[in-house]
Image (cartoon, rainbow, N blue to C red):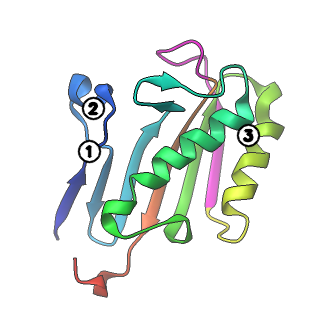
Amino acid sequence: MTIERAQSTSPWEETIGFARAVAAGDRVLVAGTMPLVDGVLYGEGDPYEQTKVAFAGALAALEPFGLGAGSVVRTRMYLTHARDVDEVARAHKELFDAVRPVATLVVVSGFVDSRVLVEVELEAFQDPSRGA
């Protein structure tokens, strides 16, 4: 089985020692992704916007493998407040309604940056015959 790794610009990857995405066989796993772009938090106080930005970052991590939203088979959403479920769900539905991946949504006590309301993860499937 071939394993490929992709990095992003997140400083956490170097600090902690992880890859943004790893392709192992026909699966691509994307690490927890917060609504940060080049170290700037987007959507402060807005769970809907944070979810969209976080998923955009996670989906961008699939691009080196030639994949997009249509390849996603699992999503995970971690949020800090149960009150935000509807807004997080609305953003998820807009992105994945046609795809219908399995999904998990969990309320957690917090993130390393207290302004972050949402963090997401993805798992995608790639056709093994794609020639990678």
Q: CA distance from mark 1 to mark 2?
A: 8 Å
How many numbered discs? 3
Measuring from the top left, give residue 128's x and y in whole percent. 30, 82
Residue at 67% across, 58% down: 95
Q: Which residues are magenta?
A: 102-116
Q: Considering only order in the chain, which callout, 3 or 1, is on the residue closer to the N terminus?
A: 1
Mark 3 is surrounded, within 10 Å at the Cα level, by few (under 14), some (14 to 19) or many (20 or more) other residues, namely many
Residue occupied by mark 1: 7
Q: Nearer the viewer, residue 61 or 74?
A: 61
* Tag of residue 88: 3
Q: Earlier in the sequence, mark 1 or mark 2?
A: 1
Q: Which residue is mark 2?
A: 13
Q: Are marks 1 and 2 in contact (CB under 8 Å)?
A: yes
The residue at 57%/12% (across/down) is: 114
37 sits to left or right of 108: left
Residue drawn at (74%, 57%) of the image: 94
Residue at 48% across / 66% down in the picture?
A: 68
Q: Nearer the viewer, residue 26 or 90?
A: 90
Image quadrant holding the N terminus, namely bottom left
The residue type indicated by label 3 comes to: Val
Other-residue count near label 2 (Cα within 10 Å), few / some / many at <14 / 14–19 / ≥20: some
Residue 56: x %, y % from top left: 54, 48
Q: Quadrant of residue 99?
A: bottom right
Residue occupying the far bottom of the picture: 129
Does residue 82 appear left or right of residue 54 in this picture?
right
Q: Where residue 13 sits: x, y (%)?
A: 27, 32
